[in-house]
Amino acid sequence: MSTTRSLLRPVLGLIAGMALVSSGPALADTTLLNVSYDVARELYKDINPAFVAQWQRTTGEKLTVNQSHGGSSKQIQSVIAGLEADVVTMNQASDIDVLAKNGLASADWRKAFPHGAAPYSSATIFLVRKGNPKGIKDWNDLARPGLGVVVPNPKTSGNGRYTYLAAWGYALSKGGNDAAAKDFVHKLFANVPVFDGGGRGATTTFTQRGIGDVLVTFENEAVLIDQEVGGDKFDVVYPSISIDASAPVAIVNKVVDKKGSRKAATAYLNFLYSPEGQEIIAKHYFRPRDAAVLKKYAARFPAIKTFTVEEKFGSWDAVQKTHFADGGIYDQIVVKR
Amino acid sequence: MASSGNRVLPGFGLSLGYTLVYLSLIVLIPLAAVFLKASSLGVAQFWDVVTSPSVVASYKLSFGASLLAAAINSVFGLMLAWALVRYSFPGKRLVDALVDLPFALPTAVAGIALTALYAPNGWVGQYLEPLGIKVAFTPLGVLVALIFIGLPFVVRTVQPILEDLDTEFEEAAVSLGADRWQAFRHVVFPTLMPALMTGFAMAFARAVGEYGSVIFIAGNIPMVSEITPLMIITKLEQYDYAGATAIAVVMLVFSFALLLLINGLQTWTAKRTGRAR
């Protein structure tokens, strides 16, 4: 079946990516390496040629952009270990903070580009089986006993972490306190039958293995499955409130200074904010920042109320310490499932 | 003690030196680095990490499932080796080659294939589901994956010994009045025992460290189906290198102790059956 194959391919690609972090031939300053997270592969495959063409038009220089994808923390670890990334494009700020702590990116990298250096965002939403047989409408439905909720492991996946935080934020928004939120998230995670390592793995579990009643994942992933992969087997459900999953980018100072590629790297990241870049982003079901582009693709992006990590939780650092560190709230929840 | 000068074979000093350097480079230095990194945690912190409930649950699963898988492989691997050595049948070479397949197959491919087979909607899983048997995403799935990857170890260690074992010994035993079972039990089996234990130890060691094939089928449910290597990866994903190496140290010590024990048992049985070499 073609759906099987088209879903299997990214999975196999992921495996290949884990086995070998691709880095092209280093040709001084005419090469940029974009080290990115796993499911942004298809996006940058479209972004890169568009940017290379634009760079050639404006400067007359030839440029090659290589891309490397994998689990976000693993990718950042490679960069720290010496993978010569000119830019990193991630799906959560905490990963870039780690780079900054290691002196590879500026401490105030958020101020280097507009919108907190996040050229696009996504939201955590639901994908349910066709016709929504279990009547899943909002977060509180996910905590119903007996429901199967597929979520990637929050300890290993940014996607899973956003889901956890979105559920927590939902409980707070309903007037609950932290104890109520903890109880709610506890019930929700007790419904998870399988914890995959990453978002794509969870997608495979839900769509190919037929596990669970609802997949909670990024909007771009859910809509992509619904529109392009799943045929008519799934429905997308937008909850009443979700988390703003901004995808931040940064320049790796140490590398661009050594290679003399700062100009090209900056232009590359700025290109993501250009109307052309934003349009490509929207085509991949990520929410663009550009109002005009967002309007053009409004049909793709139903209005959804979101909150940011900073609004509800203060900072990623605080989130990490309180929720996901050893013995943190997430550990407490899963131990007594 | 005899000094090296008295040895009949020349080159003792050279080969021992080479052995030590090689072992240090390939095995000891990386292991020392693990211990060094783990020691950056204080004792109390180390203890907290390695005894946290989900980590302890993962030891039980990893070591328990690995021992069980190695035991199952010992029984069925012995049967396989027996069939391959003692009988000739059409397609024997093919079967022989198939045994090595779990060696050669990338573990992730094995994991994905097994998961697809045993998932509730898979080829095999759909028939087990109505019987109430869940394989994929349970500890049973972990066991299935570990049996799969461990099989060649037992077959390949037992096979050559069995090939060397002349049927004359059994014939002698039978002509002296032993029945077939007694001949196997008292003549064949003791000869195979040391090799079987080596195979068991190797299958076990491989299973404890296995990640790729298990991770897809395990379901990775905290306290239930998380294997210890996953706990290590989880720590790494959170940039907690010291925590990851702490768990690695515990695994290493456990595994080493178990392997020592198995080696000791092997020597003991070899001596007992008078085949010490």
Image: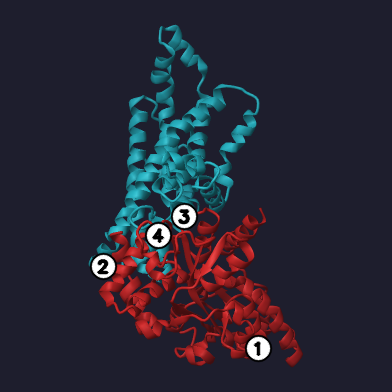
The residue identified by callout 4 is: A192
The residue identified by callout 2 is: B45
- The spot of residue A21 in percent (x, y) is 58, 67
Which amino acid lies under the numbered mark 4 shown in the image of this protein? Val
Q: Is residue A328 visible?
A: no
Give the answer, above or below, for where B67 lies relative to B29. above
Q: Are marks 1 and 2 in contact (CB under 8 Å)?
A: no
Are the residues under marks 3 and 2 on the same chain? yes
Question: Which of pointers 4 and 3 indicates the residue nearer the eye?
Answer: 4
The residue identified by callout 3 is: B215
Are the residues under marks 2 and 4 on the same chain? no
Give the alpha-carbon distance from disc 3 to disc 1, as whole Å.
41 Å
At numbered mark 2, what does the secondary structure look like: helix, strand or loop? helix
Q: Earlier in the sequence, mark 3 or mark 2?
A: 2
Q: Which chain is represented by red in the image?
A: A
Give the answer, above or below, for where B165 lies relative to A44. above
Residue A275 - label: 1
Q: Earlier in the sequence, mark 4 or mark 1?
A: 4
The answer for which chain carries disc 1 is A
